[in-house]
Image: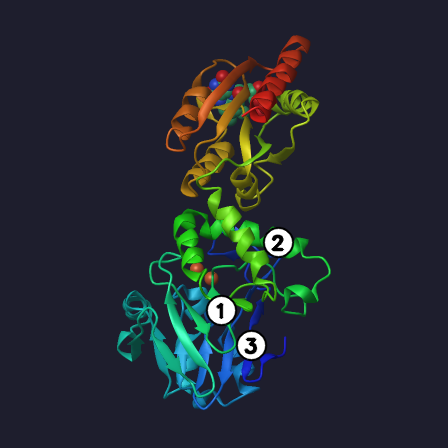
Amino acid sequence: MLPIKIRENIYWIGVNDYKTDLFEGLWPISQEGVSYNSYLIDDQKKAIIDLANESSANTILDQISQIIEPSELDYIILNHIEPDHSGALRTLLLYAQKAEILATQRGQQMLEAFYGLGSRVRVVQDGEILSLGKTNLQFVSTPNVHWPETMMTYALEEKILFSCDAFGGYGALHGAIYDDDYEDLSFYKREALRYYVNIVATFSRPVLRAIEKLAGIPVELIAPSHGLVWKHPEEIISLYSQWARLAFEPAEKGITLLYGSMYGNTVRMMNAVAQGISREGVPLNLFNVTETHVSYILPSLWTQRGVVIGAPTYEGALFPPMAYTLEMAAVKHITGKPVARFGSYGWKSGGAEKHFEELIAPLNWELVDSFDFNGGPNHDDLLRGVEFGASFARRIKNR
Ligand SMILES: Cc1cc2nc3c(=O)[nH]c(=O)nc-3n(C[C@H](O)[C@H](O)[C@H](O)COP(=O)(O)O)c2cc1C
Ligand SMILES: [Fe+2]
Ligand SMILES: [Fe+2]
């Protein structure tokens, strides 16, 4: 996309990345893409806020060149040192030779560790103001949103908050940068939630702290470094605080049903269990764990109250893709859920159950109900499955 003027002397100059298949080498974005938003301020002093990944360095240089010569840059402000925003730095410095890099103290240490550039960094303090001429920038330290060094940059006169990862989302920009350019925001909201749970959820307390800290600051525009620029900041702030509070407060009254199966026996039972849940009118999100990347499953686990797991016994243990899904839930601190489990076994019951209990121990999930059945489910087994689903659903409804 071409640069977009967002104020008299402030430009969005982001990069749409459709090349990366896995964000952080882990989270699928081939379909959705992601944007790295940078912002250029063309004032008496010239500054760029946040960059892009290493392979986008040429695009960043092109974007800058459409407004100023990269050699004119006085400041490169790095709110966050993760390489999705700093990877282009070394290439940019070949052109922006006089530019000073501004980052927090921790940011400086990281720039030394990742790029050997610690000595080019000027450390900025929380609350410090940098004057560019007409525009004054204030740095707001917001540690652990997402890494320990993170800060945000606030344009005082324009009331723009350059929030970096916070309030960001997956999803490349479809030709326009503002929330109100899009009639339907469902794609961006869904991708912001997936991004939140994949990337930020572990840091929900720091997110709430940052939101509290920002409460006194009038913000007209939220300009994150991924995804949409928000002309209605309250909308994305409220989504983020809702999602962050889910780390501490009860989730929605719905159920995530995860299943996996080798030969379909557990699937037959899963259909019966789902029937019981639906009978009680409880919203249900179904995922086949072997066919769905965990990135798409975690948002449901995060936002819904109950979990049902259906997976067979595999070599004396729980079906491996299910075990992986639960391990990832633990990595993302999706704790304190009521859970029910079922699964088919061939020759000896108990291995899946024991393994499952080990997996949910760090999650602090409460095992409400559990059963194994031998081989294919018969009619009585299926009736039991329906009742098992219904009774778990009632428990979720009445919590
Ligand atoms: C690779 C493999 C390992 C298995 N390991 C066990 C096991 O340790 N204990 C057991 O009781 N059954 C075991 N089974 C049998 C399955 O649990 C049984 O076939 C079950 O019905 C599969 O459920 P599904 O049709 O939902 O995949 C194993 C089957 C396979 C293919
Ligand atoms: Fe990050
Ligand atoms: Fe990022």
Point out the quarter of the image occupied by ligand 2: bottom left
Pinpoint residue 151: horizontal percent, then vertical percent: 39, 65
The answer to whether residue 376 is left or right of residue 129 is right
Give the Cα separation between the discs numbered 2 and 3: 22 Å
Q: Is residue 28 above or below residue 36?
A: above
**Image quadrant for the N terminus?**
bottom right
Q: Is residue 50 above or below residue 385?
A: below
* Label 2 CA crowd tier, 10 Å (few <14, some 14–19, many 20+): some
Pinpoint residue 270: horizontal percent, then vertical percent: 63, 24
The residue positioned 63% from the left and 35% from the top of the image is: 285
Residue under numbered circle 2 = 189
Say whether mark 1 is within 8 Å of ligand 3: no
Pinpoint residue 20: horizontal percent, then vertical percent: 54, 61
**Element type at marker 1?**
strand
The residue positioned 38% from the left and 71% from the top of the image is: 139
Label 2 near label 1: C-beta < 8 Å?
Answer: no
**Element type at marker 2?**
helix
Say which of 8 and 5 sits in front: 8
Residue under numbered circle 3 = 13
Amino acid type, mark 2: Lys
Amino acid type, mark 1: Leu
Residue under numbered circle 1 = 161
The residue positioned 49% from the left and 82% from the top of the image is: 41
- Looking at the image, is mark 3 or mark 1 earlier in the sequence? 3
Say whether mark 3 is within 8 Å of ligand 3: no
* Label 1 CA crowd tier, 10 Å (few <14, some 14–19, many 20+): many
Give the Cα separation between the discs numbered 1 and 2: 19 Å
